[in-house]
């Protein structure tokens, strides 16, 4: 069964700060950005004139960043070198709220560094020109492995998920993986694995979930059908859930009951696939810790990964960005009419993304040019315009028994077709005060035929830091005048 968008929105709106442990290959991603307009005079290569540099945690460190951006409490478990890149990596994680108590310093083993050169030429998008790697990929053992596992024993207490991010840099040996999975199982902690690109996955045996992409799954199974790949991995590795990511085709989920679910994704403009696997692991783990079903977790991971590939470089995707993406998709499918409860959830996500909300209200019975001009001006007061619409009984009480001329369904349909209107919410009362107090708009818009102190809810909005805007009306345009003209005898 596929995930319902309403349920995903509610899940993200009720998100809590679950605690997760991330184990794996921690590395430092360093970037040099600049202009690459000219060629070297002494070799047939472009010259990068560096304009700025940046350093961010990569590998398992990026999974930590993703989880922190999703609002989770994150603990890092891994190794760093006794060097400047290691110090920069640890500080970078701390700056993003990650607990680095589990990052053990290993003298004699350098911190893995990926140094990328990013050039811009002829006003095009920045492109990666070259990458320099500094690493020691030999498998760890002895004191380093024992220290790592002893640290893990303590850190597993109190976490809800163990996420393993394997980049094949020597930290997650067969022995270390087996010990980590066993220790998590003893404590009832589920284990999610993003595997390294390798020919054999035996070291992940017994994990709760594994998340290879199509190419990785084909390499390890020798099969081409995604469902067959997933079944082979499930059967041979004793892994309950398998998620095979399928690029633009979304993902395939094989659950513990053997049911296969295809989870589609929204078509997006792919700019850079770097970091997509990290964000899939992070969102799956965080969503499951937040009570999501497996189809829901995969759907959320798909959405987050889709947002990631639209960005240049590795940029953590925040919870509110995922929620806003779902809302935009939901908006296209559902239209503009909302119940107040649903509207509040969506507006919360929009506000988290920095958008301001404008509210206005009215009967909008016989729509005319004055209405259109008024709503257009109200919309210009902020980023989103919510229109409160009187229900039929409310209109009759305010305008008389002959009104409304157009029933609620017709008025909703007409308002929904206006480009200036983002949402419409119906209220049964004679005034929208209750809706205004629930929405708490940044701007309350009303026609300039009202005095400021006559605007219902204006005092509330101003008391909560908002403002009242009086919108100029088009002279000679009103529903009452239109109806009178229609009723007047004609020669």
Image: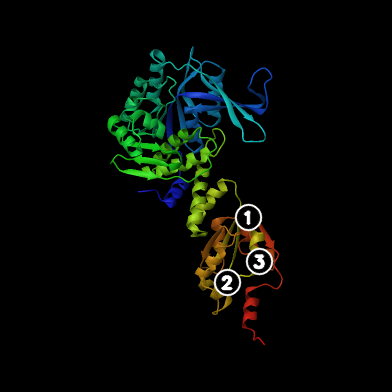
Q: Do callouts 1 and 2 mark residues in contact (Cβ within 8 Å)?
A: no
Q: Look at the picture and state if 137 lies above or below 455.
A: above
Q: Depth check: 270 or 447 in front?
A: 270
Q: Depth check: 321 or 311 in front?
A: 311
The residue identified by callout 2 is 365
Instruction: Give SS at disc 3.
Output: helix
* Circle 2 residues within 10 Å: few <14, some 14–19, many ≥20: many
Instruction: Give SS at disc 1.
Output: helix
Q: Look at the picture and state if 104 lies above or below 243.
A: above
The residue identified by callout 3 is 454
Dot 1 or dot 2: first in sequence order is 2
The C terminus, quarter of image: bottom right
Instruction: Give SS at disc 2.
Output: loop
* Circle 3 residues within 10 Å: few <14, some 14–19, many ≥20: few
Residue 286 occupies quadrant: top left
* Circle 1 residues within 10 Å: few <14, some 14–19, many ≥20: few
In the drawing, what numbered circle is on residue 463?
A: 1
Q: Depth check: 489 or 411 in front?
A: 489
Whole-percent x, y for residue 247 in the image: 45, 38
Inspect this view and state whether residue 193 appears: no
Whole-percent x, y for residue 123 in the image: 67, 35
Which residue is painted at 70% across and 73% down in the image? 476
How far separated are the C-alphas under marks 1 and 3?
A: 15 Å
Dot 1 or dot 3: first in sequence order is 3
Which residue is painted at 59% across and 31% down in the image? 127
How far separated are the C-alphas under marks 1 and 2?
A: 31 Å
Q: Residue furthest bottom?
A: 491
Whole-percent x, y for residue 365 in the image: 57, 72
Inspect this view and state whether residue 88 appears: yes
């Amino acid at each position: 069964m596929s995930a319902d968008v309403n349920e995903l929105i509610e899940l993200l709106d009720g998100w809590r700060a679950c605690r997760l442990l991330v184990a794996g290959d921690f590395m430092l991603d360093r970037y040099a950005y600049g202009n690459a307009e000219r060629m070297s005079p002494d070799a047939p290569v472009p010259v990068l004139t560096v304009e700025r540099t940046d350093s961010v945690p990569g590998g398992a460190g990026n999974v930590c960043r993703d989880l922190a951006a999703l609002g989770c409490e994150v603990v890092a478990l891994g190794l760093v070198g006794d060097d400047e890149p290691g110090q920069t990596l640890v500080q970078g994680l701390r700056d993003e709220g990650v607990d680095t108590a589990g990052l053990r310093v290993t003298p004699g083993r350098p911190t893995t560094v990926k140094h990328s050169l990013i050039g811009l030429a002829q006003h095009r998008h920045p492109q990666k020109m070259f990458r320099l790697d500094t690493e020691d990929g030999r498998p760890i053992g002895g004191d380093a492995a024992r220290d790592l596992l002893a640290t893990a024993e303590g850190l597993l207490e109190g976490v809800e998920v163990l996420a393993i991010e394997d980049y094949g840099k020597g930290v997650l040996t067969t022995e270390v993986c087996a010990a980590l999975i066993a220790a998590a199982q003893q404590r009832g902690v589920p284990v999610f694995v993003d595997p390294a690109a390798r020919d054999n996955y035996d070291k992940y045996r017994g994990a709760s979930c594994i998340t290879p992409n199509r190419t990785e799954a084909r390499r390890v199974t020798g099969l081409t059908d995604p469902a067959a790949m997933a079944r082979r991995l499930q059967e041979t590795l004793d892994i309950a859930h398998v998620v095979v990511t399928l690029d633009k085709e979304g993902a395939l989920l094989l659950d513990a009951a053997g049911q296969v679910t295809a989870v589609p994704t929204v078509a997006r403009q792919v700019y850079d696939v770097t970091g997509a696997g990290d964000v899939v692991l992070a969102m799956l783990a965080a969503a499951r810790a937040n009570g999501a079903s497996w189809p829901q977790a995969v759907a959320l991971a798909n959405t987050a990964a889709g947002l990631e590939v639209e960005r240049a470089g590795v940029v953590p995707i925040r919870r509110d960005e995922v929620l806003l993406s779902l809302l935009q998709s939901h908006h296209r499918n559902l239209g503009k009419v909302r119940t107040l409860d649903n509207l509040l959830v969506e507006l919360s996500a929009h506000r988290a993304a920095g958008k301001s909300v404008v509210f206005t209200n009215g009967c909008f019975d016989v729509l005319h040019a004055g209405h259109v001009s008024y709503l257009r001006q109200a919309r210009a007061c902020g980023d989103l315009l919510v229109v409160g619409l009187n229900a039929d009984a409310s209109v009759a009480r305010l305008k008389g028994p002959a009104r409304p001329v157009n029933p609620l369904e017709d008025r909703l349909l007409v308002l929904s077709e206006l480009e200036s209107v983002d949402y419409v919410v119906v209220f049964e009362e004679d005034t929208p005060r209750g809706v205004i107090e629930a929405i708490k708009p940044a701007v309350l818009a009303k026609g300039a035929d009202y005095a400021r102190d006559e605007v219902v809810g204006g005092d509330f909005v101003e008391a909560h830091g908002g403002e009242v805007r009086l919108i100029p009306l088009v002279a000679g345009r009103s529903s009452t005048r239109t109806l009178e003209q229609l009723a007047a005898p004609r020669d």
